[in-house]
Amino acid sequence: MLLALATTVCVTLLTIQTTPFPGPTAKFDPTRDAAADIRAAIAEARRTNRRVILDVGGEWCSWCHALDRFYEADAELQRLRDTHYVWLKVNFSTENTNEQVLRNYPLIKGYPHLFVLDRDGKVVHSQDTAALEHGSSYDGQKMREFLLKWAGR
C-alpha cells in the first residue's frame, strides 16, 4: 500500500515537471510565470515546427470557458489546432494581470484574446475572439479559417 502511494506521488511529480506550460485543456492559473511559459511554448514551437497561440483570459471569463467547450466538442478542430499550434493559456485576472508580459503585445479589448506568434515569438496576428463567435459559442467555419490562415505553412 505504501509502495503504491509512493509510486503515485512520483508519477504525479514527474508529470508536473514534464508539463512546461499550461496547454489548451488547462485552467488559467494566476500563479504561473507567464514569461517563462511563453519562452517554453516558443521553444516547443521551434522544436515541432508550429506557431504559438497565446490564449489570454481567466477563470472568471464565461467566453473563455465557452471557447474551451467549443474545442472539446470538435475533435477535428482540436486536431487542426494541435497540428499547427502550441496553445498556451495566459492568465489575466485581479489576482495577476500579467502586466509585465502583456505590455509587449497589442492592446486587448476583450477576453479571451488570441495572439498568434511565429517560431521566434513575434506577433503575427492579434485576434479579438468576438469576431469568431456565433450565438452563445463560436463559429466552426470562422475558427477553421482562422487556424488555417495563421498556421504559417
Image: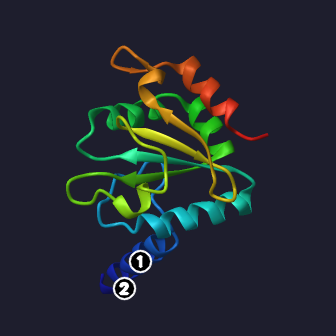
In this rendering, which labeled residue sits more in front, label 2 or label 1?
A: 1
**Where does residue 152 sit, x and y in percent of width and height?**
74, 41
Left or right of 53? Residue 95 is left
Compare residues 51 and 83 and report the one nearer the observer.
51
In this rendering, the answer to whether 121 lies above or below 36 is above
Farthest top residue?
135
Left or right of 103? Residue 93 is left
For disc 2, the neighbor class at 10 Å (few under 14, some 14 to 19, many from 20) is few
* Secondary element at image label 2: helix
In this rendering, the answer to whether 136 lies above or below 49 is above
Name the residue at 68% across, 43% down. Answer: 84
For disc 1, the neighbor class at 10 Å (few under 14, some 14 to 19, many from 20) is few
Name the residue at 42% across, 63% down. Answer: 34
Name the quadrant containing residue 95.
Answer: bottom left
* Position of the N terminus by quadrant: bottom left
* Secondary element at image label 1: helix
Name the residue at 36% across, 78% down. Answer: 9
**Where does residue 119 sit, x and y in percent of width and height?**
69, 56
**Where does residue 129 sit, x and y in percent of width and height?**
44, 30
| Residue beneath disc 1 | 13
Name the residue at 51% across, 68% down. Answer: 20
Name the quadrant containing residue 112.
Answer: top left
Q: CA distance from mark 2 to mark 1?
A: 15 Å
Give the residue type that dot 2 points to. Leu
Give the residue type that dot 1 points to. Leu
Tag shown at residue 3: 2
**Where does residue 45 sit, x and y in percent of width and height?**
67, 57
Tag shown at residue 61: none
**Callouts 2 and 1 close, C-beta under 8 Å:** no
